Amino acid sequence: ITVVTWNVGTAMPPNDVTSLLHLNTGETNDVDVIAIGLQEVNSKINKRLKDALFTDQWSELFMDVLSPFHFVLVSTVRMQGVILLVFAKYYHLPFLQDIQTDCTRTGLGGYWGNKGGVSIRLSIFGHMVCFLNCHLPAHLEKAEQRKEDFATILHMQQFEGRAASGILDHDLVFWFGDLNFRIESLDIRFVKYAIDSNILSQLWEKDQLNIAKSTWPVLSGFQEGPLTFPPTFKFDVGTNKYDSSAKKRKPAWTDRILWKIKSPGVGLGVGGRRPSQGVLSVSQLCYCSHMEYTVSDHKPVAAIFAVQFASKADKPPIEIYVADEWSRPEQAVVRYKMAAGFHRSSWDWIGLYRVGFRHPKDYVSYVWARGDDGERCPEKPLSASGLQVMFSEEALPKGKGEYILGYYSNTSSSIAGVTEPFQISLPRSEEGSSPTDSSGSSSEEEDDSTLVLLAPKSRSPSPGKMKRHRSRSPSLAKFQGLILRPSSRERGMSRSPSPQSRRGLPGDIPTIHLPQEEPGHRGAKAKEPGWAADSQEGSSLYQTVWEHGGPRRVSIDSPLGRADPRNLGLLPALRLEMIDQAMGRRRESMDQGYPCQRMSPTSPPGCSTSPKEGSSP
């Protein structure tokens, strides 16, 4: 298990974090779990709004760097600028269960989350492990406040289930973060001399956390490796030089990583028996800082632990069986078997992932694993405890690649079963034959749906059914005189599923163009809706403008046509009428003997001359 803590000081992420995560060494092959605790991530209002819509840049960086090494994000929790992420190798995911998170604010008397703690707890092969990332109060004289805040965090954070309701009830606890403990008594000049002379041991006995471990009951049982690296705070940003500002803060080991194994005497084992000695052991293999990172006034700290225990889970909750290669769509059959006692849900699903996927929602496609109600995907029983589902041809990726199948449990919000990587080798479909093309759809089909503007891949907690949403308003096809022009700014950029939309039309700004009838053709049937580009080759778009009291047809490509507000996208409102209504009103006005014209698309129907005497208005 690798644990990393870093107060990033609201900085942007660096370009490379491979050395921080020890990815450039042989140790990576042996690491199974990585926990990363960050403090002071930029949490200004504009950043928080952006991070609410998209993943924050730090989390994106770590996912990008770790996914090629087969690490998958297991869980994450954020409280303002305090973030905790836990990654694990993909083949361990089914054995990581009962995942829960919690957070406790201690800033401004518990109302503000700039200080406090966030935690992720989970069962690892049947053993309860908790990762706790804290940012405690700063300054030398606040040692007692740090103790009180830590005690508050331990007391406030409670988890569901009988296995481990409190943090200290877990079999193993990792406590890390910017704990802000300082060096007492010693003068800043002596501290810097000890650092330069590499006699760090003379500073250990004055370290507030070392003193507290032997005097504070709340810290009883917590262990830490020797501090053989220089103090990690405070540096001039962009350098390896300690604080040279007017404040000249004394260097200190503020960034720490500790662990605690639950005492055999705390709690009773199964059946009221005490757990046997030696069930779980921890040894620290590495404890170091990384001076090469200079984006913050803190240096990051990393520790690598070897944790040994007897596995309590030999088989995953879901065992998935799949062929070594899918070269034909009919081979996309997935067989799976559930362990006794597994709590299935009708919202469970089986995802198809590329090798190197980043998190459980990073799937290529999925099928529903039907629940007891039988309303999900077609599912055939294999035996008393075995089932099978099949991926449709449309859901399968084309081309060659390595993939993994994972069973996502909605109840536990985690992956309960995975396969080994297997090959998919399907021929790529011919260009233009995509099943999503709708060039042959009729106007009646358009009546049942709205125009799809964006159709991103779902990243919701459980996959959404890919349905076409029905419109509650009258469909576009019913307005027979309405011509829609595609909204792409250049050819080939439209995201509409219809291939006609990829052709592009003159003009950069999307408009709605209302065609005008030529004089003498007012009773003619209006054109069917469609793209204007589908007219005869070489034809152009025309519109009728009123000039000096008379109509004239002009091309929209002419200066007069381009200057029309309707072509500039400046139309403030649009009056939509059924064709029969509009034409009927025009006929009535013509029968009364006076012309009725509209001077602008938004003006109400008005008359250019006064009605005859005696006629009704």
Image (spheres, grey):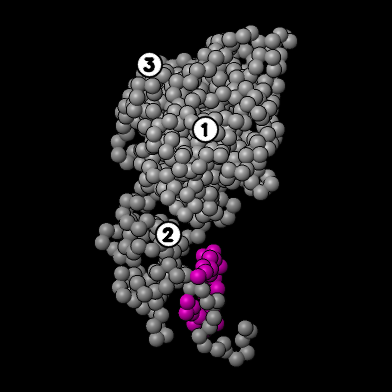
- The answer to whether 380 appears left or right of 391 in the picture is right
Range drawn in magenta: 572-600
- As drawn, which residue projects farthest toward the bottom? 613
| Local crowd size for mark 3, using a 10 Å CA cut-off: few (<14), some (14–19), many (≥20) | few
User: Which residue in the structure is indicated by mark 1?
Assistant: 256
Q: CA distance from mark 1 to mark 2?
A: 62 Å
Q: Nearer the viewer, residue 21 or 601?
A: 21
Reading the chain from its start, which is encountered first: label 3 or label 2?
3
Pointer 1 or 2: first along the chain: 1
- Looking at the rendered structure, the kind of residue marked 3 is Asp
Q: Which mark is residue 89?
A: none
Q: Position of residue 548 (x, y in %)?
A: 39, 86
Residue at the spot 39% in from the left edge and 74% down from the top edge: 564
| Residue 324 numbered tag | 3
Three-letter amino acid code at disc 2?
Leu
Q: Foreground mark, 1 or 3?
A: 1
Q: Would you name the residue on which mark 2 appears?
A: 484
